[in-house]
Amino acid sequence: MITASPGARITPAPGAPAGDWRQLWREAITDGAELLALLGLPELAAQLPPADAGFALRVPRGFAARMRHGDPRDPLLLQVLPQLAELDQVPGFVADAVGDMAAREAQGVLHKYHGRALLIASGSCAVNCRYCFRRHFPYGEEMAAAGQWRQALEHVRQDATIGELILSGGDPLALSTSKLDELSRGLADIPHVTRLRIHTRLPVVLPERVDDAFGAWLAALPLQKVVVLHANHANEFDAGVDAACARLRQASATLLNQSVLLRGVNDDADALAALSERLFAAGVLPYYLHQLDRVQGAAHFAVDDARALALLDAVRARLPGYLVPKLVREVGGEPSKRPL
Ligand SMILES: *Cc1c(COP(=O)(O)O)cnc(C)c1O
Ligand code: SF4
C-alpha cells in the first residue's frame, strides 16, 4: 500500500472563497474511488457497489477532511460510503419505513403529531447519508417550497392547532435564504404559528451555509426558533461547526441535536458520551437518539433494542441527565415518537 503524503489530504478546493456555500456544495465529492484515494484507502474501491445502485455517494470536502486518514472504520466515512450490503434484501426493511405517504395532507406537508406540522421544504442534501429514509422518498412531487409555499401555507393557515412549523426534508437549508424569506413572509399573517423549527444537517456537514445572510434572516424572524442539528459522532465537529452553532445561537435559536444509533459508527457508550459532551461544548443539547428507521438498504446499521437500551443505561450512568438523549423509534400511525 502506498502511504499518502500529507499533501494528499483533503482540503477544501483551492480558489473557493470562504463562505461561498453554493460553490462548496457543488464541489462535493461524488466519486467513491476519489474519496477513498484521498483518504489513503484506494484498495477499498474494489468493494464499492455499482455506481447506479440508486443512491449516489455525496459528501462535502470539508466533512471528508474530518475523516481519519487511512482508517476504513472511520465513523464519518461509514456514514457516507456505499456498501455492497445495501443491496441485500432484508425482511422488515422497506421503502416507506415510517408511513410518510399516509401522513401527507397537502403538497409537502406531513401532519402526524398534535400541534406541529412538518414541511418537506427541499429534497436536496449536501451529503447522502447511507442510513437515510430519503433514498426512497418521491421528492419530485412533494416539495412544499414549490409554488412559493402556497399550498403548504394554506394548510397551516386552516388549522389553528398548528403552533409549530417544522422545516425538514431533505435539508431545508438547501434552499436559498431568499426562498426561506418567502416562507417567513407567508407566515406573518398566520398568528397561531409561534415557533419555527428547522431540522438540518447542513451546519454540521457544510457549516459555511450559516452565512451572514442566513444569520440575519433567522435573527429577524418574529417567532421562537429551534434548530435541530443532525450529528451522529463527536468527530463531525470542528471549529467551523462551532462557529456555525455560535451564529445560530446569536440569532436566538435554541439548538438541539438528533442522532441515529448506527452500528459501527456510534454504537458504544464512549462514542455516545463523547458526542453529548461535544454537542454541549458547541452550545447544543442532545434531543433524540433514534433507532434506525427500517429502510431498505440500511439493515447493516441496525442495533437491536436490548443493546440500544444497555448503551443508554451506560451513558446515563456517566453523564448529567441533560446530556442524555431520549431513545426513540418512529412508528407509523402513532401520536408521537415511541420511547424505548
Ligand atoms: C418527528 C416528526 C415531528 C417532530 O416530532 P417531535 O417529537 O416534536 O420532535 C413532527 N412531525 C413529523 C411528521 C415527524 O416525523
Ligand atoms: S435527510 Fe438528513 S440523514 Fe438523510 S441524506 Fe439528508 S442529511 Fe442525510
Image (tube, helix red, strand yellow):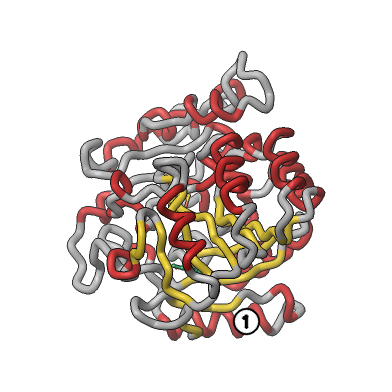
Tell me: 212 left or right of 158: right
Question: Residue 81: x, y in percent?
Answer: 39, 45
The answer to whether mark 1 is within 8 Å of ligand 1 is no
Q: Amino acid at mark 1?
A: Ala
Residue at 37%, 39% in the rendered image = 57
Q: Residues within 10 Å of mark 1 (few under 14, many from 20)?
A: some
The quadrant of the image that shows the N terminus is: top left
Question: Residue 94: x, y in percent?
Answer: 23, 66
Q: Is residue 72 visible?
A: no
Q: Looking at this view, is 278 or 325 the one in front?
A: 325
23 over 188 or under it: above or below: above
337 over 191 or under it: above or below: below
Q: Looking at this view, is 311 or 127 the one in front?
A: 127
Residue that sits furthest to the top in the current view: 15
Which residue, given by chain and number where applicable, does mark 1 sit on?
314
Tell me: 281 left or right of 185: right
Q: How many marks?
A: 1
Residue at 36%, 30% in the rendered image = 31
The quadrant in which residue 41 appears is: top left
The quadrant in which residue 18 appears is: top right
Residue at 48%, 39% in the rendered image = 126
Q: Is residue 145 visible?
A: yes
Secondary structure, mark 1, is helix
Residue at 54%, 70% in the rendered image = 162
Tell me: 79 left or right of 270: left
Question: Residue 131: x, y in percent?
Answer: 38, 57
Question: Residue 178: x, y in percent?
Answer: 59, 34
Residue that sits furthest to the right in the current view: 250
